[in-house]
Amino acid sequence: MSQNSTVRNIWVTLALLGFFESAAVAQLSWTADWRRIGNSAVDFSLSGLASGAVDRVWFDSEGARIFARTPSGAVYSTDDLEGWQLAKNVAAPVADASSNAKRIPSGARLVRTQFRNSPKSYAAGSHVWRSENGGDGWENITSYKGQSILGGDILDLVISPKDEDEIVVGTTTGIWRSVDAGKTWLSLNGSLPNLPIRRILTTPGGTRGMRLELGSTADGFSAEWRPGEKLSWRPLAAFDVQRKEELALRKVVEQKLGIVNTVQTAGDLVYAGTKDGRLFVSLNRGIDWLPPQATGVGAVEAIQIDLKEPRRAVAVLSARDGATKGAVWRTWTGGMFWEEMTGNLLAAEIRGVAIDPPSGAVYVATSSGVYFTYAELGAAEPNAAAKTWTQLVGNLPEHPVRDVKLDPAGNQLYVAVEGWGAYGTMAPHRLRQLRAVSAADQSSRPAAPGSLISIIGASVDQASIGALSSPVLARSAVESQIQLPFQLTGTTVALQLETSKGRTEIGMTLEPTAPAIFVDRDGTPMLLNADSGVLLDVMQPARAGTRIQILAAGLGRVSPDWPAGVAAPLRAPPKVNAPVRVFLDRIPLEVAQATLAPGIVGFYLVEVILPNVVNAGPAELYLETGRAESNRVRVYLEQ
């Protein structure tokens, strides 16, 4: 591939992955640029993609439009089988009250065709059955090897008024359509916003993608949007360790307290909340409990603990039946004292909470959106009861928000929106407390000569280290990218910034190298096929024996010397001085070259050759320079 093609492909990749964020600030609201993570479909290896339960389905009188109702009561419609629109003020027709005929399968409900003198009829239950002879005989049309190809019980079935061979069913896994009387089935779940989302388990990081807890019944499941995924959420083989530990701890707690609604722990400190609004704390991992705090509100939905100082915690509660206001409570004494901080927050349902202890930011997920405020998490506040909450507005769907979570570094904010799935944005508290991170993976790793650094929380006009200028490469209202000079020496740097908020200084540790592989905000690594320039992901895996290019940062000084802020030459770009090693599932790869990325500022390009024989599927890839390791990313392989 030519150098010009390499440059073009890199820039296209940067644009697609979206390395910059924007936001606007307004009184009592903060406008965020939310990006969607994944979609609302799940791959259960059925006859198509699945979603959440659909309990009613019906056609309009002409058979041109299909309606679907979810258990939450939301009704959606489609007339092209591609997109779904929320249908307001539309009620489901009266359910068919036909009594079961004697000859239909046990437990099924008969659905007769409306076509006169037709011998065809259907029955719905654990499967779908079809009769072609007036009910004298039945054929199961959804069973394969004893399992339903639609994945769950049939909650509703309707026959098109235009064609008795066209049927639509609502099941525990979504909505499905057949136009040949059940011989083949088509999923209509791809764009239906009906993901049965409960909460966020983990945020993207390393080789792990976004993970959610899903399910409409007590035995829910966890699913992941894998880095580089394009199609659907993938169920994990089993609940992750976090979930198993929670279930075990809940069992221990309930032996002492009875049924609880939520349990959280940090070391020996255990917090528990009940459905009647009581907050419990144990200082010795559930053996003994302090007297409970009665809140007078509804169910305790979630508790967030400051893991570095577990005596600090925030709990959120939904309103009692018929009430219009939930509540937020906090403790800074390990549960000996609790304080309400609901203030002007008027949401009836408050389902999730996230905190950033260094800034005091508190975020809550509610039935009317996402809100945040600031609190003195380590001390009492005289005006805590009068807290002012700010709503995060923007391009989120107008649906209840079920959970909220910060990434471990407190830079990115993630929310779970009922039906729609996961969304992320820069956490607004970064506007109050700036942070310098690696532009490659948003981590707080040390700096290195030539590093590309993101300043999160401000628009930077100028940057310098002593007498050396650090070029500002790009900036937005909430984030800026700068490059450190290649000639830096020593063990620390003091980065002086001229920002939209005035002058400030950020100290950073300096190492000879601080390698990092570029990933987008959702964990997709910037790995390219060296011949075609195609971005590698789950849909475009790397083939055995081919060359792949890794876009990286922090590889240190180069030869010949090169000035910061200037794009590397297209021909003979400077080579990395430090030895670069690349590992695939901990096995070293052959490194063909390690240089500055031609035509690009601040990027390094490492090209490696894959073995002629590889294990198909996901693999772990990382760089190493000196004693420093990069972040670990997921690459998909095929033989």
Image (cartoon, rainbow, N blue to C red):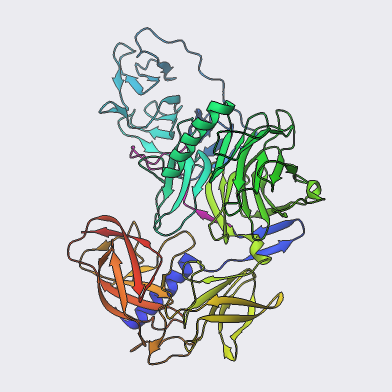
Q: In the picture provided, is 558 more to the left or to the right than 97?
A: left
Q: Residue at x 61, y 66 (%)?
A: 22
Q: Residue at x 40, y 53 (%)?
A: 226
- On the image, the x and y values in percent for residue 209 come to 43, 54
The answer to whether residue 503 is above or below residue 572 is above
Q: Quadrant of residue 326?
A: top right
**Which residue is situated farthest in the top direction here?**
102
Secondary structure mostly seen in the magenta stretch: loop
- On the image, the x and y values in percent for residue 560 come to 38, 92
The answer to whether residue 425 is above or below residue 338 is below
- On the image, the x and y values in percent for residue 23 come to 64, 64
The C terminus sits in image quarter? bottom left
The N terminus sits in image quarter? bottom left
Which residue is nearer to you in this view: 64 or 24? 24
**38 is within the stretch colored magenta:** yes
Q: Which residues are magenta?
A: 34-52
- On the image, the x and y values in percent for residue 367 come to 65, 41
The answer to whether residue 456 is above or below residue 83 is below
Which residue is nearer to you in this view: 316 or 490? 490
Which residue is nearer to you in this view: 22 or 634? 634
The answer to whether residue 185 is above or below residue 443 is above
**525 is within the stretch colored magenta:** no
Which residue is nearer to you in this view: 470 or 254? 254
